[in-house]
Image (spheres, rainbow, N blue to C red):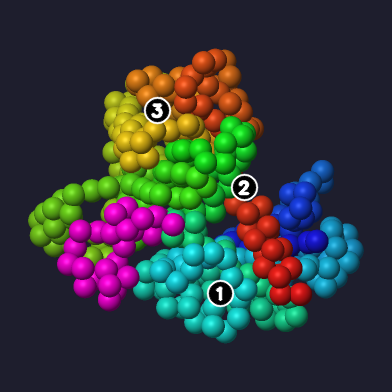
């Protein structure tokens, strides 16, 4: 089976053609600068990258460019788009409606549209990707996979905000959480590695955007992001948890409107805001090596907050069997993993410095005898999307 996985952003579209059974990737690529000019980077394993400037006024041209190159006689990996059995789309906000993936039909599209007020930055872009694929591949089934769905198992005490209850009931105000596809994948792998399906696992998805998730018995029981992806630990450019009084204070002091203020919290805060150097953790580590104190504080703050969440989730679950690191920082930075776990000895979590040198591969990096396992598991959201798509399309036929 061949599944085309699509992740559409406001001006970009990532695609990956893969086999959901084996995880083999036939081709993948990135269309960027959609609506501006248009650039395509296309990769086929074992071959040179292809980079093209192609006019992409909208996502429709982007998906056509991707399909054309996948079927082209010169660079193709398939003879015709009929070989694509189904498309799986990443959709960021599933609101209170979606607790699992679903086949895209008119009803599903309407429901995704209804979630736009909750996910105003992402859902419209995800929908443009879906519409472009429906137009380009009229007979191919399409499936939506939601970032929020995995967290719908959280108990009310974890997802309820302490605001007047009418907002929770009438307006769907609650914690939703994100990176659910990633947390689902890595917690599943961790439970398999431990050979313990009912394990208590704390997943640390640390990338440009970061979130933690407490998983017990295969289910998300708490997560650090909230109604939107601003909450939780500080990120590349997002503040993470913040006292609303700060917001009120800055708005009245500088006369900022809501849009200006949320832009500051989303795009100018986090480790970029503290350091003034970069949102990229590699740049931070470089600056620290040169003696930059603000970069040092930014990293210290990030590490401290991640460690605090780990402690909180261990307390929330009444114990922990494994702490898992994933995503750009979690998979690649041994020094940040080491800094986070330093101080978790009381929990029984200890890292082996040699094993912790691993990068980008599945590994148990805990010290021999460490009660809590510390694992590095590269995430694979595309594989989860492809597998869900295969399952849902399989059921239909
Ligand atoms: P996104 O949230 O955009 O999907 P990723 O999970 O790809 O992000 O993570 C990207 C981030 O990972 C980069 O901003 C960079 O800070 C970080 N990163 C990647 N490699 C390393 C490394 N070797 N050391 C430290 N940080 C790294």
The picture places residue 378, in percent across and down from the top left corner, at: 60, 39
Taking the image as shown, residue 192 lies to the left or right of residue 211, namely right
281 or 51: nearer the viewer = 281
Under circle 3, the secondary element is helix
Q: Are marks 1 and 3 in contact (CB under 8 Å)?
A: no
Tell which circle, 2 or 1, labels the residue nearer the N-terminal end.
1
Mark drawn on residue 128:
1
| Residue plotted at (45% across, 72% down) | 97
Q: Which residue is mark 2?
A: 380
Mark drawn on residue 77:
none
| Residue plotted at (49% across, 65% down) | 99
Q: Nearer the viewer, mark 1 or mark 3?
A: 3
Report the Cα–Cα distance between label 2 and label 1: 23 Å
Above or below, 258 against 269 in this view is: below
| Residue plotted at (54% across, 15% down) | 368
Taking the image as drawn, is residue 327 in sight? no
């Amino acid at each position: 089976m061949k599944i085309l996985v699509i992740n559409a952003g406001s001006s970009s579209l990532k695609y990956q053609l893969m086999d959901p059974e084996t995880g083999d990737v036939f081709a993948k690529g990135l269309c960027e600068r959609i609506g501006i000019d248009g650039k395509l980077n296309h990769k086929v394993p074992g071959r040179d990258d292809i980079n093209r400037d192609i006019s992409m006024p909208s996502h429709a041209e982007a998906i056509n460019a991707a399909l054309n190159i996948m079927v082209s006689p010169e660079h193709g990996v398939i003879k015709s788009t009929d070989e694509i059995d189904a498309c799986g789309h990443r959709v960021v906000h599933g609101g209170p409606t979606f607790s699992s993936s679903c086949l895209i039909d008119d009803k599903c599209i309407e429901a995704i549209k209804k979630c736009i007020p909750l996910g105003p930055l992402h859902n419209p872009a995800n929908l443009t990707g879906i519409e472009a694929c429906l137009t380009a591949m009229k007979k191919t089934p399409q499936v939506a996979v939601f970032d929020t769905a995995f967290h719908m198992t959280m108990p009310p005490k974890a997802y309820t905000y302490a605001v007047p209850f009418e907002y929770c009931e009438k307006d769907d105000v609650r914690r939703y959480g994100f990176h659910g596809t990633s947390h689902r994948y890595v917690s599943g792998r961790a439970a398999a590695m431990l050979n313990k399906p009912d394990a208590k696992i704390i997943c640390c998805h640390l990338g440009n955007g970061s979130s933690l998730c407490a998983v017990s018995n295969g289910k998300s029981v708490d997560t650090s992001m909230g109604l939107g992806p601003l909450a939780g630990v500080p990120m590349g450019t997002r503040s993470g948890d913040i006292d609303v009084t700060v917001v009120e204070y800055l708005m009245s002091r500088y006369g900022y409107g809501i849009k200006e203020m949320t832009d500051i919290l989303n795009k100018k805060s986090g480790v970029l805001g503290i350091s003034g150097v970069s949102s990229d953790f590699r740049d931070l580590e470089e600056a620290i090596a040169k003696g930059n104190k603000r970069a040092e504080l930014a990293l210290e703050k990030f590490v401290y907050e991640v460690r605090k969440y780990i402690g909180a989730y261990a307390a929330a679950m009444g114990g922990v069997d494994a702490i898992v690191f994933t995503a750009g920082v979690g998979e690649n930075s041994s020094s940040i993993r080491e800094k986070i776990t330093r101080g978790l000895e009381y929990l029984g979590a200890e890292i082996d410095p040699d094993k912790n040198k691993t990068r980008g591969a599945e590994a148990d990096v805990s010290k021999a005898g460490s009660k809590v396992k510390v694992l590095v598991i590269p995430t694979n959201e595309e594989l989860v999307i492809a597998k869900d798509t295969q399952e849902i399309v399989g059921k239909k036929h």
